[in-house]
Image (cartoon, helix red, strand yellow):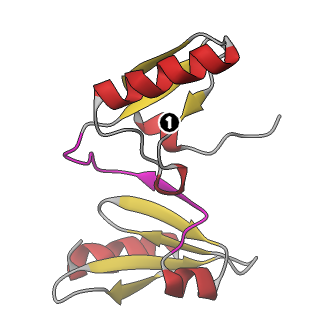
Amino acid sequence: MDEAKARVLAKLVGGEEWRIGEREFVVVLRRPDGSIVALSDDVVAEYPGDGAFDAGTPSTNILLRDDPTEYWVIQDEEGGVMLADPDHGRGWPSEEEAEHEARGIQSRTGLKTWARRQRLEDTLPARSP
């Protein structure tokens, strides 16, 4: 996001704007528990602390803008969703790869599985009851 947008968003959420490139900015929000939330045009990422933030390893993230790559996930008959790269919230980059993995899982476990297009909610962490 640009500087003006970052400034307005930082004021709205009580965070601070950070320059991350020549013309790119993010908004950083430090939470009372020590975790850090970073907001950009593309993603909202949560880091457990300064070390993870500095290393660029979020504990969770939510993609806000579609990646130009269409990703595929595996869903099972119980509603579970499997990602190829859970750390980055991404499925398989091709339907054929996801279908191949789904067939393998089904043959090993007997659980009916299939490939489908990835949706934004597939990247959200599961909530405890």
The secondary structure making up most of the magenta span is loop
59 in magenta: yes
Q: Amino acid at mark 1?
A: Asp
Q: Residue at x 31, y 76 (%)?
A: 6
Q: Position of residue 94 (x, y in %)?
A: 28, 33
Q: Position of residue 123 (x, y in %)?
A: 50, 43
Q: How many marks?
A: 1
Q: Residue at x 45, y 61 (%)?
A: 44
Q: Residue at x 55, y 68 (%)?
A: 58
Above or below, 66 relative to 109? below
Q: Position of residue 46 (x, y in %)?
A: 57, 67
The residue that label 1 is drawn on is: 122
- Quadrant of image for the C terminus: top right
**Mark 1 neighbour class, 10 Å CA radius: few under 14, some 14 to 19, many 20 or more:** some
Nearer-the-camera pick, 65 or 30: 65
Q: Position of residue 128 (x, y in %)?
A: 80, 39
Nearer-the-camera pick, 111 or 87: 111
Q: With 2 as the anchor, is 98 left or right in this view?
A: right
Nearer-the-camera pick, 32 or 84: 84
Q: With 114 as the anchor, is 21 left or right in this view?
A: left
- Quadrant of image for the N terminus: bottom left
Above or below, 87 relative to 52? above
Nearer-the-camera pick, 20 or 72: 72
Instruction: State which region is magenta.
Output: 57-69
Above or below, 63 relative to 107? below
Check the image and name the residue furthest to the right.
129
Q: With 36 as the anchor, is 10 left or right in this view?
A: left
Q: Residue at x 42, y 46 (%)?
A: 90
